[in-house]
Image (cartoon, rainbow, N blue to C red):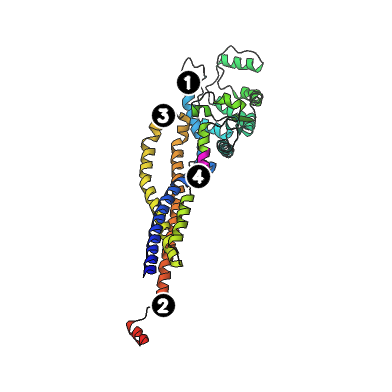
């Protein structure tokens, strides 16, 4: 009797331990789903590149810049002390000019390269403060110095009011290399004069563009992120890694260890409770389905809260607090933030659904295996049992 009682106690202890490990797995796996995958997305450049494609940033840029230029130049030109000549251009005219100069494919290519470089600086560069982010402007330089640039100037000139006599004289003086006595010669000359001006415009654009380097260099302002003005000076002599960057890299490194707790608890649960195929399908299916379902329930509860924050507070309070430039707001930074949040939600939903589906499949398989085994091995009836015993 004692061995039987001891064996029964051990079985009870193992079952209790298995339930404890199962509970730990469900909670820790839910935590992994809400940390491992979102952090992996936030530290992945493709996450931001895809969001920019989703909101059509590159196609919207000419229209956005056109609206901004039309509004800003008209406002500044109306100020007598601004010294800016009045450019009488409609939004559509500005959009046509910018569309000729800026190729969305070039903009997308360069933006994606810049994002890749930024994440290299943040996560891998041994000297992040002194590592530049490079932006190639060679293609747009060639566009400005070529026929597209001259055509853009012509569109600007053709949109201006006709030149008066003084302005025509000044145009001739400029063409002869003389100084002009008129403050502004921005006007529309007759067509025969405009055709003579085009070679001059081309040469001016060529000389001006030649002074712009083929590659522009930018540095991430870590000193502003850390409120330490001396970060740049310290980094000149040593490979200094700012504190905020150290934390980001530590989180990225620790992320690889996040799944260890659910994996260990799953292994211990298996050792404690699983002795057959049916037990494997029951325990694994139960914890997988529970973890996936719990994650989906939590994301379902959090979606309305996130949407409320985005629609009610982000466009006004947060954007004003961090002083986002108006051009970025017009370009769709609020739409971009919503796209990023949606992708974060997807990064949680996909593993949750996969986990729940796998768990449900195991439980469904357990049902059919149990039913099949009962069909193959029916229990003997009481009459048959009596006959066998006699």
User: Relative to residue 69, is residue 18 drawn left or right?
Assistant: left
From the viewer's perspective, is residue 173 above or below residue 40? Answer: above
In terms of secondary structure, where does tag 4 sit?
helix
Magenta region: which residues? 249-255
Kindly report the distance in space between the C-alpha atoms of the residues bearing marks 1 and 3: 25 Å
Q: Are marks 1 and 3 in contact (CB under 8 Å)?
A: no
From the viewer's perspective, is residue 143 above or below residue 51? Answer: above
Kindly report the distance in space between the C-alpha atoms of the residues bearing marks 1 and 4: 51 Å
Q: Earlier in the sequence, mark 2 or mark 3?
A: 3
From the viewer's perspective, is residue 259 above or below residue 361? Answer: above
Q: Which residue is mark 1?
A: 76
Q: Earlier in the sequence, mark 1 or mark 2?
A: 1
In terms of secondary structure, where does tag 3 sit?
helix
Instruction: Locate the N terminus by quadrant.
Output: bottom left
Q: Earlier in the sequence, mark 4 or mark 2?
A: 4
Q: Which residue is mark 3?
A: 321
At which x and y percent is residue 86?
Answer: 50, 21
Q: Which mark is residue 377?
A: 2
In terms of secondary structure, where does tag 2 sit?
loop
Q: Callout 4 environment at 10 Å: few (<14), some (14 to 19), or many (20+)?
A: some
Q: Earlier in the sequence, mark 1 or mark 4?
A: 1
Camera-nearest residue between 155 and 101: 101
Res 43 visible = no
Name the front one of labels 3 and 4.
4
Camera-nearest residue between 321 and 196: 321
**Residue at 53 percent of width and 35 percent of height:** 246
């Amino acid at each position: 009797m004692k061995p039987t009682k001891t064996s029964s106690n051990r079985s009870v202890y193992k079952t209790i331990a298995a339930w404890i490990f199962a509970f730990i797995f469900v909670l820790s796996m839910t935590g992994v789903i809400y940390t491992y995958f979102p952090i992996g997305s936030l530290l992945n450049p493709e996450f931001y590149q895809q969001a920019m494609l989703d909101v059509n940033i590159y196609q919207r840029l000419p229209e956005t810049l056109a609206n901004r230029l039309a509004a800003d130049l008209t406002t500044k030109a109306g100020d007598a002390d601004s010294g800016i000549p009045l450019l009488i251009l409609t939004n559509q005219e500005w959009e046509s000019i910018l569309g000729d100069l800026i190729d969305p494919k070039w903009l997308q290519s360069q933006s994606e390269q810049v994002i890749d470089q930024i994440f290299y600086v943040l996560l891998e560069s041994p000297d992040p403060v002194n590592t530049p982010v490079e932006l190639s402007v060679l293609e747009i330089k060639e566009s400005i110095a070529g026929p597209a640039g001259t055509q853009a100037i012509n569109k600007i000139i053709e949109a201006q009011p006709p030149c008066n006599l003084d302005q025509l004289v000044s145009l001739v003086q400029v063409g002869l290399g003389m100084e002009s006595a008129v403050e502004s010669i921005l006007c529309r000359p007759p067509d025969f004069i405009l055709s003579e001006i085009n070679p001059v415009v081309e040469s001016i654009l060529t000389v001006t563009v030649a002074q712009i380097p083929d590659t522009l260099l930018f540095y991430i302002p870590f000193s502003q992120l850390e409120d330490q003005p001396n970060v740049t000076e310290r980094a000149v002599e040593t490979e200094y890694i700012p504190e905020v960057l150290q934390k980001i890299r530590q989180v990225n490194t620790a992320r690889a260890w996040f799944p260890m707790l659910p994996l260990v608890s799953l292994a211990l649960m298996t050792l404690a409770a699983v002795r057959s195929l049916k037990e494997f399908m029951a325990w694994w299916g139960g914890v997988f389905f529970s973890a996936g379902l719990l994650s989906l329930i939590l994301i379902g509860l959090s979606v309305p809260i996130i949407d409320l924050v985005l629609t009610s507070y982000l466009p006004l309070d947060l954007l004003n607090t961090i002083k986002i430039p108006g051009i970025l707001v017009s370009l769709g930074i609020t739409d971009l933030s919503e796209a990023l949040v949606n992708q974060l939600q997807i990064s949680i939903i996909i593993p949750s659904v996969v986990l729940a589906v796998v768990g449900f499949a195991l439980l469904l398989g357990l049902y059919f295996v149990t039913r099949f085994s009962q069909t193959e091995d029916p229990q003997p009836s009481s009459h048959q049992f009596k006959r066998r015993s006699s």
